[in-house]
Amino acid sequence: MARIKEGKYIWMNGELIPWQDAKIHVLTHALHYSSAVFEGIRCYKTEKGPMIFRLKEHMERLLNSAKIYRMDVPYSIDDLMKASIEIIKANEIEECYIRPLIYRGYYNLGVNPFECPVEVAIAVWEWGKYLGAEAIEKGVDVMFSSWTRIAPNTLPPMAKAAGNYANSQLIKMEAAMYGFVEGIALDAQGFVSEGSGENLFAVKDGVIYTPFLDACILPGITRDTVIKIAKDEGIEVREVLIPREFLYIADEVFFTGTAAEITPIKTIDKIPVGRGERGPVTKRLQEIFFGYVKGKIPDKYNWLTPVK
Ligand code: PPE
């Protein structure tokens, strides 16, 4: 992966700070105890100018993640939406990834975080294809991870919290070391959960399957988008517990996520999924998904927020 492409400013607690000066102290609470929650959002270049995809839903999830961790955030959803627009404009960027972060700042250390200030930052940068340049068309090779996904009542999976990504990093590093693009984690019971940073879908005999929340997934916004698009297309979607081997014999399997968008999976544990290439259902869903995000399909769900 290439080094992050630096922009001009980062939004920190209501101010635009020059990129290089957006720093924190080494004794920041979040750095030691993962007391942070975050989001990942994409802004797409469209014919009507830059548009942010499902900004409100992302900010809702961000504030819900903060609520789970008892963080008092001094900003509303509306404030955070406005701040995102402001920082995109300040960076004069048309297409980007938006990373809002809420974290416990510098005051004292010790597990109890309550006295540390709750800080908010929003950064934007250009981020290309998450799982490789060719992934969207050609698909990726993945493995089942030897690491189990975070279990119920340990780290709450519905919160998009920094701590969850310690688990994700173990999954991702293992996959990379073995030469795979990504790992799929099973939940504590052995059912399919998700990728290190993506939700997962399977297609079999014309029906779409995806794990429900009981498999400890992050309730992905792209996942929700794909479910809505599939239903609009008249395809049945079942949110169920999925056994590992179901993926080996599925016709198509794909990842969804803000960063990954819709990425086909061509092999799992070196077993070809279907014919080992992107399948027709995945392709159709991609066409509609990219149609919405790029403003080419009428925005009937009000998913796009204009920057200008
Ligand atoms: N599961 C996990 C664990 C996850 O991190 C993501 C997003 C998803 C599912 C999909 O959620 P959504 O983006 O709402 O459809 N992962 C973000 C972070 C990736 C990263 O490397 O950082 C993302 O895609 O932005």
Image (cartoon, rainbow, N blue to C red):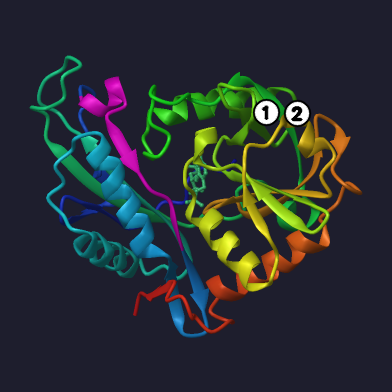
Q: Is residue 72 magenta?
A: no
Q: According to the image, label 2 marks what residue?
A: 179
**Quarter of the N terminus within the rendering:** top right
Residue sitting farthest toward the top: 110
Secondary structure beneath label 2: loop
The residue depicted at 25 percent of the width and 44 percent of the height is 22
Q: Residue at x 29, y 52 (%)?
A: 122
Q: Is residue 31 magenta?
A: yes
Q: Position of residue 151 (x, y in %)?
A: 47, 24
Q: Which residues are magenta?
A: 28-42
110 vs 141: above or below = above
Q: Position of residue 295 (x, y in %)?
A: 53, 79
Q: Is residue 208 visible?
A: yes
Q: Is residue 133 visible?
A: no
The residue identified by callout 1 is 176
- Label 1 with label 2: CB-CB less than 8 Å: yes
Amino acid at dot 2: Gly
Residue appearing at x 26%, y 37% in the figure: 68
Q: Residue furthest right?
A: 275
Within 10 angstroms of label 1, few (less than 14), some, or many (20 or more) residues? some
Q: Which circle marks residue 229 in the picture? A: none
**Quadrant into which the C terminus falls:** bottom left
